Image (cartoon, grey):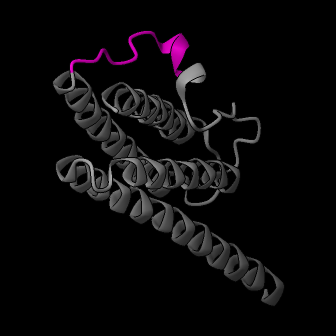
Amino acid sequence: MKRKLIELFNQALADEWLSYYCFWIGAKVMVGPMRDEIAKEMDEMATEKLKHAGILVDKIMELGGTPVLAPKDWHKTSNCIYEVPRDFSVKAILFQNIKREQCAVDAYKKLISFTKNKTSFESEILSDILEEEIEQKDHLINMVEHLEEKTCAQKNLKKDT
């Protein structure tokens, strides 16, 4: 059980590092409407990813395991696929991150399911992280909706003039 738990924590750790990079680099390269506002929020979300990574490393160490040490191993260990940004539009970057967040939500649900009835302390911590992942995914979806509303309003304004 301990070995499997360490493996699952390392998968989640790799997910968090790749998510951090996805949010961070997306905030830097995105272009288009609302870029500055959305980039600022994505930078804040990236910081949350580092916080989650820290919690996971602490848990892995408490269990006597070793966290994934080499960035090259994140891809092999991760539950979620890292997609290199090809379309730098704000909307495309947001969708890419929504996809990652959904993967993270699924991975944390799997991890919680594994720890359920075995170790309530880990389940509680993981549930808190899961809640934050869901909030981030919902926030990203809200940003897409706000972006679409603003874009639509601007198009209507141009039609009227």
Instruction: Give the residue displayed 46% in from the left and 28% down from the top.
Output: 14
Query: Is 56 a magenta residue?
Result: no
Residue 39 location (% of width, % of height): 47, 48
Against 28, residue 123 (above or below) is below
In which quadrant is the N terminus drawn? top left
Q: Nearer the viewer, residue 22 or 11?
A: 11
Q: Is residue 84 left or right of residue 138?
A: right
The picture quadrant where one finds residue 62 is top left
Against 154, residue 75 (above or below) is above
Q: Is residue 147 left or right of residue 104?
A: right
Q: Nearer the viewer, residue 86 or 68?
A: 68
Instruction: Give the residue displayed 59% in from the left and 55% down from the top.
Output: 98
Instruction: Give the residue displayed 33% in from the left and 18% down from the top.
Output: 67
Query: Is 66 a magenta residue?
Result: yes
In which quadrant is the C terminus drawn? bottom right
Residue 17 location (% of width, % of height): 43, 29
Q: Nearer the viewer, residue 83 or 34?
A: 83
Residue situated furthest bottom in the rendering: 160
Residue 9 location (% of width, % of height): 37, 33
Q: Is residue 144 left or right of residue 74?
A: right
Q: Is residue 64 left or right of residue 16?
A: left
Dominant SS in magenta: loop
Q: Which residues are magenta?
A: 64-74
